[in-house]
Amino acid sequence: MISWKIEEVGFDSRNIASNGNKFLTGNGYMGVRGTLEEFTKENLVAVNLAGIYDRVGQGWREPLNAPNGLFTTLRIDEEEFSILKIQPYFHRCSLDYRKALFSRNTVWKTKRGQVEIESERFVSLDEPHLIVMKYSITANFHADIELITGIDGDVWDIHGPHYDYLSLSIKNNDLIAVGTTHENKDKVYVVETCKCDFVNETNYSVDDKRVLRHVSFITDPGTKYTLTKWISVFTSRDDTGCRDESEAVRLVEDCSMKGYDHCRNAHIKKWEEKWSVSEVIIEGDDAAMEALNYSLYHLHSIAPRHARSMSIAARGLSGQTYKGAVFWDTEMFMLDFFIFTEPEVAKTLLRYRIDTLGGAMAKAKHYGYDGAFYAWESQEGGYDACSDYNVTDVFTGRPMRTYFKDKQVHISSAIVYGIMKYIDITGDESLLWENGAQGWKTIIECARFYYSLLLKKLDSDYYEIHDVVGPDEYHERVNNNGYTNRMAKYTFDTAIRVIDLIDRIQDDLAQKIRSEYPVEQLREKFSDASAHIFIPRPGKDGVIQQFDGYYDLEDATPSILKGRLLHEKEYWGGAYGVASNTRVIKQADVVTWLAMFPKDFPVETMLANWNYYEPRTEHGSSLSACMYALLACRCGYPDLAYPFFLKSATVDLIGGGKQWAGLVYIGGTHPAAQGGAYMTAVRGFGGLDFEDGKIKIKPRLPKSWRSLRFKIWHRGRLYLIEETGESAKITPVG
Amino acid sequence: MISWKIEEVGFDSRNIASNGNKFLTGNGYMGVRGTLEEFTKENLVAVNLAGIYDRVGQGWREPLNAPNGLFTTLRIDEEEFSILKIQPYFHRCSLDYRKALFSRNTVWKTKRGQVEIESERFVSLDEPHLIVMKYSITANFHADIELITGIDGDVWDIHGPHYDYLSLSIKNNDLIAVGTTHENKDKVYVVETCKCDFVNETNYSVDDKRVLRHVSFITDPGTKYTLTKWISVFTSRDDTGCRDESEAVRLVEDCSMKGYDHCRNAHIKKWEEKWSVSEVIIEGDDAAMEALNYSLYHLHSIAPRHARSMSIAARGLSGQTYKGAVFWDTEMFMLDFFIFTEPEVAKTLLRYRIDTLGGAMAKAKHYGYDGAFYAWESQEGGYDACSDYNVTDVFTGRPMRTYFKDKQVHISSAIVYGIMKYIDITGDESLLWENGAQGWKTIIECARFYYSLLLKKLDSDYYEIHDVVGPDEYHERVNNNGYTNRMAKYTFDTAIRVIDLIDRIQDDLAQKIRSEYPVEQLREKFSDASAHIFIPRPGKDGVIQQFDGYYDLEDATPSILKGRLLHEKEYWGGAYGVASNTRVIKQADVVTWLAMFPKDFPVETMLANWNYYEPRTEHGSSLSACMYALLACRCGYPDLAYPFFLKSATVDLIGGGKQWAGLVYIGGTHPAAQGGAYMTAVRGFGGLDFEDGKIKIKPRLPKSWRSLRFKIWHRGRLYLIEETGESAKITPVG
């Protein structure tokens, strides 16, 4: 079995950024980067908040980091001991990702003896607004200790500062920080309280960025001195609409009364509940099992359970990169995990899209289209945070015009795909018809969007979609991207399906819909569109051309292109990137189509495309490997899939992935790759599928996997799936 | 009156390149750059040949330079006297552009005394294959002279060397160079013969690049010693299909028998004939008259009178820049001059397009379109020499993907516009129906091309053209460029006109056409297309948006953008150029539309567009100023037009114009600007127009112009137009 623990022994400052992601703890409401207590913004400390954004000047709009209530540093015999300044004798940090506990252990040798600190912290899964930390000191001499701990309001921002005002105060034993944001005057409340299990002298200090307590005492050799901190975080954007710090104060006072262990147990219990459904057990391959469950740990840590309608950012809660925005990653890569293990979260994610239909319709209108054109980088209300200049030219330092926002039209189909997947697997149609969230409308408006994109040459009888960017972002403004056209067709078909469903629902809603929309006319239009939209066919070799003219480009490989780079950080795409005029693609494109629609073509065709495109794929996106893995499984080649699966599952464990796009830092966790790894495990290797409302299993386990066990929710019931070799068992649970 | 002479006194090596253009002499068959006799390829010497091209390796295909039969240098007392090595005491070169005579006068002081050389040369307008030069030496002491003169086969090439073999020989007194090109094994024959009016000792030398004679003598003080050279140039591509050097030998021997003065007189007589029709007389403004007639001199010098079907390169016969290719410049900018002053030349130019229909149809097919998509940079047979990578990135040294070739679809309409303009003004329809050249077919195929470009959105009832580059090349891949769509509509209308004409022509041809084309069906299609093609309308402010989304771009000015340049030679266009995402345009675009179709809108609309676009125009193309000048005249503002007219007329006189596009040298003469200056003079200031087959004049002379006089051919008759103030007189001549 696996250890459920990752750790790093020794301290190397070069790992600070990647460890911040690797050792992340979170609960969907917030994410706390895996940094150390004495770190400050220079070391990328962040308490990253979900779903609350701010923009300053012409900078990118990005999510907020809350003031850091964990800040703690140490003076021994009047000298500051920070791991950044004084090399430790021993250092280890670790993450128990079964229990979601981060711990740290550091020993320094001083002139007079040895001092050890130990800390443990968690972002409570039981209480979304709560962070708790225990911090202990042991010395083998009479050390003169000053513990400095409190709230550091000097937060890390990429495009900040976001707090126009930061009010810092001390009330009773509580430290209080209230930040007011620039754009919307949102409030962020952080309250910290503290208990010491030892006698000490406590003083307080406040400057314009920090409110701190100074805890002074002298150690007895061998005695452990423990300080415990409870930190609460609330914002005025919470579903409950927090208006002042009183709730935050109440929470820390209440929890500190209950004590550390109580809070810790409640937290662990919630995690055990998650694992009891979501753990994937792989016999025979601990490395895979560890990487996969570590990925699931991350997905759990960022699931927005506290909200009714919220989604997940492309870099989770690991910071402000990618603007904290929601991409197609959620629907196409993460959704399976939540549908199968926690369908309510899946519903929350999708409700976010349905609720932001207004933003999508405004975007479509802005570009002169009908219907709903979802944000490429979605923030509150569906606001598209994507810039027209998303990449910086390394040679000139100038922003480069990119087309992610205005041409990556496949985004709307991902929403439709996600909603219907949820409905088909859960059997829960309420997303379509519930009050407020009108999924039917989302789907029809997405279809109307694609309909307005269709172009007909006068002498042709099919419809085309021109000037798009497909999943492979290195080729901009292409015509008839196969993936995009196929997804558009799927959207038309789904809209027809939804129109058909209207007859079956309650009369008053059906009547309302009919009064608002000419549904019969739309059905006719969408049928015509679905029948005539151009879908590229495989050639004689079985390969589907990614877009019109792709075969006219220079044939090359990623390694050839690497040799052409003049600057290690230069952007491969855009108009003049090394990949732009070659067949080298950033990520799975045709392969994504085939992985999403495995019934479109026979296995030989899927395999031909896999074989053609894989050597031409840079895998420059963390979304790429899992699609190749999934398709290889569907072609019956799990061992071909395996390294791609592992790449996807270990992306944050290893800390790989691209850190730069041009000169823009894009580091952080990769929930889409984590979700993709899960999708590969259960749908690919596990061969999980559905037919006529029933679970279907076709095991395709890699050689080393003796067995695979996982549970899934399906139509309101939990099932245990057990697979060994080619046999499979499906057992209802409870 | 004007001097008809330009000259430069003193020698400045920095002017070598621009003087090569400024003092160019030519006769349509070939152009001899205005360089000095002792110059070699390092100084951009060229005998540039019309209509014969070669390509070596992956370099650009470009026109040939012939071996230089003018090469002459001088040793005085055993020291070489080249202006490049020994600074002269006096130096002047001049061009009599009335007589098309280039002359040079240089005085050196040596240790022993003073030596003067005088030379005069011309490229015969009487005999297309002939160049003649007289070279004289006078010393005021007994100078020991060695004149070295012959053929320099070490020619200047941009993408050469083009001669795989160069055979050099001496036969009797004749020097013979025969080059064989790389690609097509074309032959170029250069024969030089020479006469001296003094006793000398002549020796010969041949190495692998040059064949030379060494003429030695000792001067009597004050005596002038004159050597005369006759040089003939023939190629295997000539209409007569020259097969060996015998014709070239015959020509120089024949002409040398007749003597220098005879050849010179015949040449001048031919020029006088040209001027007797084409001279434009402006009373009150010598500067304008000089600049304009100097421009006409250049147009005369490059008119392909020796061929039945040939056009003019964008840089005339000034060298290999722009690949010696034919652009829309000919039809849209130069054609008026030839139609009005030498209609047979206009016909030759248009026949070239009609004869290269095959190339245009192949190009359309290559890109998946119907009909005829003319070459953006047309060489023999309509071969498109335009590269997909026409500009080099100054920051990376990499080629930049440009879209001139595949997206500048307005080119085909320029051909149609040219043909119909010729027909309407000359009344000569033979270009439509004559054997071989089938103008009717060209026009129908161009219309079929545009028809196949039309795109219809399903819910819209108009047709659009997407993804083009308009005249303003700084904005690539735009939708519904107004100029392009308007020209497409014109093409549909013209094709309908031609189809209507088919009924009127002789039965057998009409029958043949009908059997080849479903003309009635095409008429219907083109009518539908013309009726429904989207033509942008002026907004409330009268301004027409250049293309979809133009107004969304940053508003800026050329001077603002200049301030943003990081490199003086960086390209303003492309994906990331300083102009690309702003409203700054390279050249007249909407303004070209309005100048070509002055009846489309009232004067206020034309003026509104002039006022809007001019401050946003870089005039980065020599094709820009004249369109602004022409439109300003049509708006009734000749004095607003005047500086633009002058800019156009003086472009080669001053030697301005862009010398670089990225890292690519693009220098040379600017016949389109010269033609544009003429167009502005007669159509703009002169107010020349036609209605119901009649000449119409509406003078709009600039303040300083007391009168304007010019002659034009119209429907087979020559007319003298005389304008003074607001009155005009039209008198048939002869």
Image (cartoon, coloured by chain):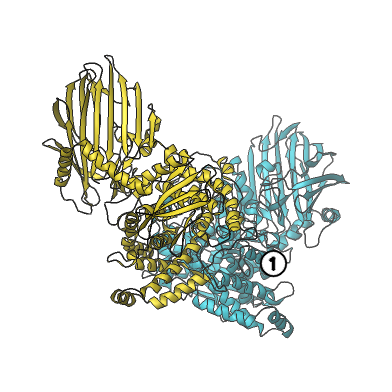
Chain colours: A cyan, B yellow
Which residue is drawn at the image coordinates 30% and 36% (left, top)? B41
Residue, disc 1: A358
Q: Looking at the picture, how far across and down is residue A216, in whole percent?
A: 81, 37
Q: Residue at x 70, y 81 (%)?
A: A515
Q: Quadrant of residue B73?
A: top left
Residue A94 percent location from the top left of the image: 64, 49
* Drawn side of residue A507 relative to residue A456, left or right: right
User: Looking at the rendering, which quadrant does residue A520 occupy?
Assistant: bottom right
Rendered-image quadrant of the N terminus of chain A: bottom right
Which type of secondary structure does the marked residue at label 1 adopt? helix
Residue A713 pos. (x, y %): 64, 73
Q: Which quadrant holds residue B7? A: top left
Towards the viewer: A191 or A620 = A620
B53 or A600, nearer to the observer: B53
Q: In front: A100, or B343?
A: B343
Check the image and report above or below for B506 versus A49.
below
